[in-house]
Image (spheres, coloured by chain):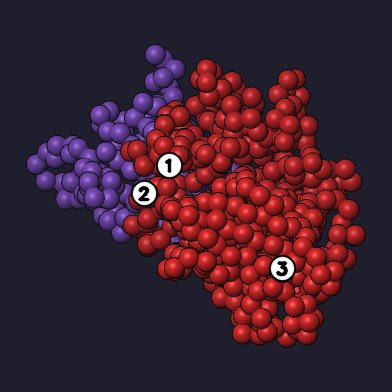
Amino acid sequence: MGTTKIRNLLAVSLTALLLVGCASDEPVDETDMGPDSGSMTTGEENMAPAEETIVQPQKPMIDPSTNRITIFDLGDAETLTGVFYFDFDQAIVKRSGHVELDKHASALMSERTLRVRLEGHADERGTREYNLALGERRANAVRAYLVAQGVSRSQIEVISYGEEKPQVMGTGESNWARNRRVEFSYR
Amino acid sequence: MRFCKPVCVSLLALLCSMLLPINMAAAELRIEVTKGVDDAVRVAVVPFAHKNRGRLPLDVTEVIDFDLTLSGRFETLPTSQMLSLPNDSSEVFSRDWRLVKVEYLVLGYLESRGDKVQLHFELYNVFKQSVEVRHVIEGNRDELRDMAHYVSDIVYEQLTGIQGAFSTQIMYVTASGDVNVQEYRLNIADADGQRVRTILSSNEPILSASWAPDGKKVAYVSFERDRRPAIYIKDLVSGARQQITDYPGLNSAPAFSPDGKQLAMVLSKDGSPDIYVLDLASRKLRRITRHYGIDTEPAWTPDGKSIVFTSDRGGKPQIYLMPLDNLKIERLTFEGDYNAKASMLADGSGLIMVHRREGVFHIALLDLNRGRLRVLTETSLDESPSIAPNGSMLIYATQKRGEGILAAVSVDGGVKFDLPSSEGNVREPAWSPIKRKVFTPIEG
């Protein structure tokens, strides 16, 4: 009981710290971010005008065609990219992805009926079966992060496609970097 | 190129039984190979007459000629340069062939008998003026191509001392379409690229197709059910299919044991990818490896007593050997930081595998007796090596101009061929372990 509470508190404050950290780190981190992951909504920092109307917390919405999730924060809608990129032969969740991952974690914790499939992928280099294992390792790393935030394992399924479903075709590091990823697929 | 005719290289052509069997006496082999290529045996495949009225559905002469030419060991004489067209040795004037410097003749004719066709053929030595082999085989009209490959196999074996592989098949996966909608197919073709048939097509990935040792069944992984991986076994004779696994996590890399009774595979249901062996009759599943790292790509040793596999338990993917009786793991590869997808040669003397050198993925051969590693390919992104049943060649997947293609290389690395396809990306070739059709000579 007590420890859970403390852990949650810690998680919240850690998240806050990371948010601060990331906001200032942003330009530095950009290089090792995947090309599509830069959709954190910035520039909306000016406080919403404090009217009397009390905004009910809105439930996250899933787009059934993309399986992406849209979250609502004080009435502001944000569709999460749900894609996280990895270094070659690595399965370490990058710091640059923590901000969005925390939003996924919050959504999953606030709505316990939400189910997400984490799809792990690898680039085309190396053997297919080894890449399947590598894709799974990446998806497991993302799951571990979410579970550490408090998400229930039962809400998460892990699947690896290895190098079989690239996001982009073609060789070279710029393509490979976009294919080493974990994608969130909500349902 | 005196009488070399232009040859159109089609899908999977050139695959057949090149050169010498796998043998670790590399230096000697290489000399012989060079000689074989430079000094190809001159053969004339004389058009086989049909002794009855009507045309047969296939020209066997063309198939035999194609097989022999593409093997790289023979130079065949175009029909237009033949001074006579004998159908058996009694009709041969040696002078006609000495003039055009032909060393051997492949002679024959066909006789229809009801629904059956009899093929009579001889391999004739022009200089000795003697018949080296004489066979008669019988088959159905729709087996003419198999009969032609049979002739090629006999000729090849007689003249090289190595079993031919013209009667074998290649299984492979194709992927076409764009990134959003891909169509995957599992195909089987003759070793000369003909008679392609599709075993499975799906919009979700198909991979890891492998043959049962009797060549009658194949195992593969398909993501078709709810986009999750499962291992299936397909009976090629009856067409029946069985789903073998449906575990959470990886269901990967099925490999039949040499006796066909067990299936090695990779499952991650217990946390991390480990090797398991399923007894196909009792359905008992035995866990073979226990490690938090990645263990994958199991391959049986030819005696069926051990499994080689890829593991990153040492930090980077390397090849390990595990005897199934005592499960004492031994590391086999030490050179390089990426060795994967190994298979052992039939005589146990070496490993064929994927090896990364200076960031580039190649196919390599590791001599297990001397510990020497030799890179066989000069292409990049090479993977999925599969050895021909006669041990002479291996086929693998690589890339050319952004497309996945198959390529073949002789085991000494001396001969290399590309096998372009018109059917999108081609990958994961697996050479069949046996001949598609076996004929018993009825006389000869």
Rendered image quadrant of residue B309: top right
- Three-letter code, disc 3: Ser
The residue at the far left in this view is A53
The verdict on a common chain for dots 1 and 2 is: yes
x, y percent for residue B202? 36, 49
Q: Foreground residue, A79 or B342?
A: B342
- Three-letter code, disc 2: Ser
The subunit carrying tag 2 is B
x, y percent for residue B111? 53, 60
Q: Colour of chain A?
A: purple
Judged by depth in the image, the label closer to the viewer, 2 or 3, is 3
Can you tell which chain is drawn red?
A: B
SS class, disc 2: strand
Q: Is residue A130 above or below residue B400?
A: above
Which residue lies under the disc numbered 3? Answer: B89
Left or right, residue B164 beside residue B57:
right
Which residue lies under the disc numbered 1? Answer: B222
Which residue lies under the disc numbered 2? Answer: B202
Judged by depth in the image, the label closer to the viewer, 1 or 3, is 3
